[in-house]
Amino acid sequence: MAITEFRADFPILKTKINDEPLIYLDNAATTQKPQAVIDAISAYYTADNANVHRGVYTLAARATAQYEAVRDQVAAFIHAPQRESIVFTRSTTDSLNLVAQTYGEQVVQAGDEIVVTAMEHHSNLVPWQQLALRKQAKLSVIQLQPDGQLDLASARQLISDKTVLVAVAHSSNVLGVTNPIKVLAQVAHQHGAIIVVDGAQTVAHQPVDVQALDADFYAFSGHKIYGPTGVGVLYGKLSLLQTLTPAQFGGEMISDVTWERTEFAPIPQRFEAGTPNISGVIGLGAALTYLQQIGFAAIQAQEQALTEALLNGLLAQSAVTVYGPQSVAQHGPVVAFNVAGIHPHDLATGLDLGGVEVRAGHHCAQPLMQLLQVPATVRASVAFYNTTTEIDHFLTTLQAVKEFFQR
Ligand SMILES: Cc1ncc(COP(=O)(O)O)c(C=O)c1O
C-alpha cells in the first residue's frame, strides 16, 4: 500500500478551514488521529468500560487485560527489556516530573550538578531548574553549534564527576535536530550520572531502542504519536525504578495498608496512583498497532521527502531565516523560521486564512528563543500523512502572505 493511501484513515484531514482544505502542519504540537484510534476508544467505552486492577468480574478483567496488553506493546515498541519498565503517565511533562520528584528528590544533593541542553522544551528544563533551586544544586547548559546542533565538546566539558543527571531532548521541537543520545549516555555514565531523555519529538518519526541508547529514563506522549491526549509513557531501567519511593500515593499503588504503614505495589503499579487513563492507554495501543502496519521505513522516506520540500522551499524564499541546520541530511520534520519584518503571529494568521495551520510562538523553549535572539518563530512540522502538494500550497500561501504584509 502506498503511504499516501493512509491519509484517508484520518477523518479530520477532510475538514475545511476558512473555506480552504485543511493543511495541517502543526504535527510537532500534536498529531491527528486515525479512525483506528478513534474506534478503539469508542469500542472501549461502548463494550468494555470498567476500572482496571480492581474487580474480579468479567468486564474489569477485560479492561485490565486490554490496559496491560498495551504495556507489553509499548515495551516492545521502544525495545524495553521488560514490561515492568513501562509506567503510564499523563504526558511527557508528567513523566519528566515523575523522575524529578522521585529520583531527583531522593538522589540530588546540595552542590551536585544537573546538566541540560540549550534546546530543551520547558518540560525538560523547568522540573530540573526547580529541583536544582530546591536542592541548591547547579544547573549547567550544554551549548549549541552555530547551525543548532548540539556541541559535544561543550557536553564533554560540562559533564563531570559532580554531575548526577543529564536531561536531554532526543529531538528538538524547534531546531529539527536529533541528538546523539548514545554518546551522551556514555559520557554521563563514565561520570556516574544518569541520562533522562525526552523522546516527545522522536518516537513518531524513527524507531527507538532504549537499550541501544542506554537511556536511564525515556519519556514520551501518546498524542504526538497519533494516540489520544492525556496519556504518556515513562520508561525507566528496572534497577533504577526499584530504588525509588513513589511521589504520588493513593489507590492502585499499594499492596498492603495499615493505619501505621503502607507496602507499595510492585513496579510499575506503584508509580500509577489512582485510576489511570484507561481509554487513553487503549487508544495509544491502537496508535502503535496502526503505526506498525505502516512501518518506519515508509514513514521515514515520506517525512524526509516532505522535509526536503519544506526546507528547500523556505530557503529559496526571500527574507526567510530558517533556524537549525540548513541541510535536510541533518534536519528532522520540524522547521522553524521567520520572515524579516513580519511578526510570526501575523504570518500564522495569514496562513490560517489559506487553511494552513502552523504554530507561531516560543514553542515552550524561551531560553532557546533568547539564544536565537528572537521572541518567537513560525514552525511548520510534517507527518507522514502530509503531501508534497500541501507543502507547495503552504509555500505559495506564505509567499502571498509575505507580499500582503510587504505591500
Ligand atoms: C521536545 C518536547 N518535550 C516535551 C513536550 C511536552 O509534551 P506534553 O505537552 O505532551 O507533555 C513537547 C511538546 O510540545 C516537546 O516538543
Image: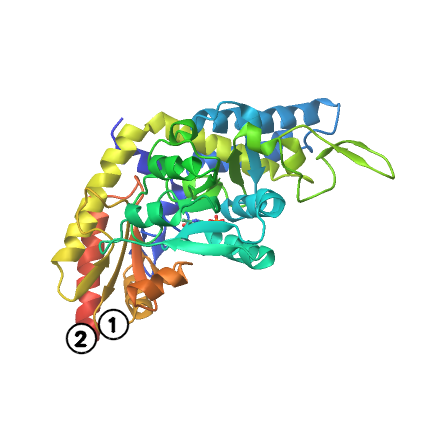
Tell me the kind of residue under disc 1.
Ile
Tell me the kind of residue under disc 2.
Gln
Give yes or no for contact between labels 2 and 1 (Cβ–Cβ under 8 Å).
yes
Where 26 sits versus 87, above or below?
below
Instruction: Identify the image quadrant of the C terminus.
Output: bottom left
Residue nearest the observer in this picture, 35 or 56: 56
Q: Residue at x 46, y 24 (%)?
A: 76
User: Is 296 positioned to the left or the right of 65 in the image?
Assistant: left
Quick one: SS at disc 1? Answer: loop
Residue labelled 2 has its Cβ within 8 Å of some atom of ligand 1: no
Q: Which residue is the site of mark 1?
A: 342
Mark 2 neighbour class, 10 Å CA radius: few under 14, some 14 to 19, many 20 or more? few
| Percent of width and height locating residue 249 | 72, 42
Report the residue that reaches farthest toward the right.
Answer: 259
Q: CA distance from mark 2 to mark 1?
A: 8 Å
Q: Nearer the viewer, mark 2 or mark 1?
A: 1
Q: Which residue is the site of mark 2?
A: 406
Q: Residue at x 27, y 30 (%)?
A: 298
| Percent of width and height locating residue 50 | 68, 32
Where 53 sits versus 388, above or below?
above
Quick one: SS at disc 2? Answer: helix
